[in-house]
Image (spheres, rainbow, N blue to C red):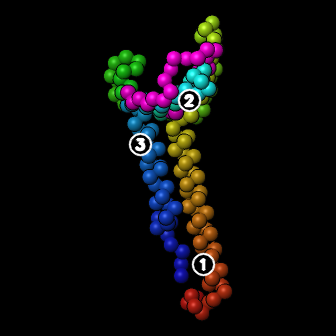
Amino acid sequence: MAARAFHRSRHFWLGVPGLVFLLWAWWDSGGYMSTVEWNWNGGKREHLVWVAVGDVTWQCTTHQERSAGVNFSTRRNPLANFGGGARGRQFDVPPAFSRSLDDGEFAWIGVAVEEAHVALWVIAGSYAVAWLGVVAWWQRRKARVVRRQQQQHPAETGA
């Protein structure tokens, strides 16, 4: 009895859709901006997550007073609507991580804006490394079990 090839593993095939989705999201972010927005803490804190031009951005806006924002919404807009004119798909490779805090521009009305950016190539690469690490670990584990069975019962396994 030999261990099966990695491409016949359930772990391998269960991970493929996740990687395909992340690669599609990276490709799609070159032409569209997808956003999710929600309020928290009675409307004093607004969260906005968007995917555009190769990165995922989380923005938190804190208000001194209750904001007039929505409770939950989603949007998907072509990037041609932002920055003027149709430029086609943009395939930027942004920096891996970045963070900014802007409390100066809107401080006079009691608003602080914090942003964190993570590049989609970092997310897809981390997913691929973790997924293939699990597949490799599982394959090694199965091979060890098969070896142990062959050592304990050499007559039954044909060794």
The image quadrant that residue 155 belongs to is bottom right
Kindly identify the residue that appears in the image at 51 percent across and 33 percent down. 55
Residue furthest bottom in the image: 155
Please state which amino acid type lies under the numbered disc 1. Answer: Val
CA distance for labels 3 and 2: 20 Å
Q: Residues within 10 Å of mark 2 (few under 14, many from 20)?
A: some
Residue sitting nearer the eye, 2 or 110: 110
Q: Position of residue 46 (x, y in %)?
A: 56, 24
In the rendered image of this protein, does residue 148 appear above or below residue 88? below
Q: Which mark is residue 58?
A: 2
Q: Position of residue 91 (x, y in %)?
A: 43, 33
Q: Residues within 10 Å of mark 1 (few under 14, many from 20)?
A: some
Residue sitting nearer the eye, 134 or 104: 104
Q: Earlier in the sequence, mark 1 or mark 3?
A: 3
**What residue sits right under mark 1 in the picture?**
146
Kindly identify the residue that appears in the image at 45 percent across and 38 percent down. 26
Is residue 75 rendered magenta in the image? yes
Residue sitting nearer the eye, 88 or 69: 69
Q: Is residue 136 visible?
A: yes
Q: Secondary structure at mark 1?
A: helix
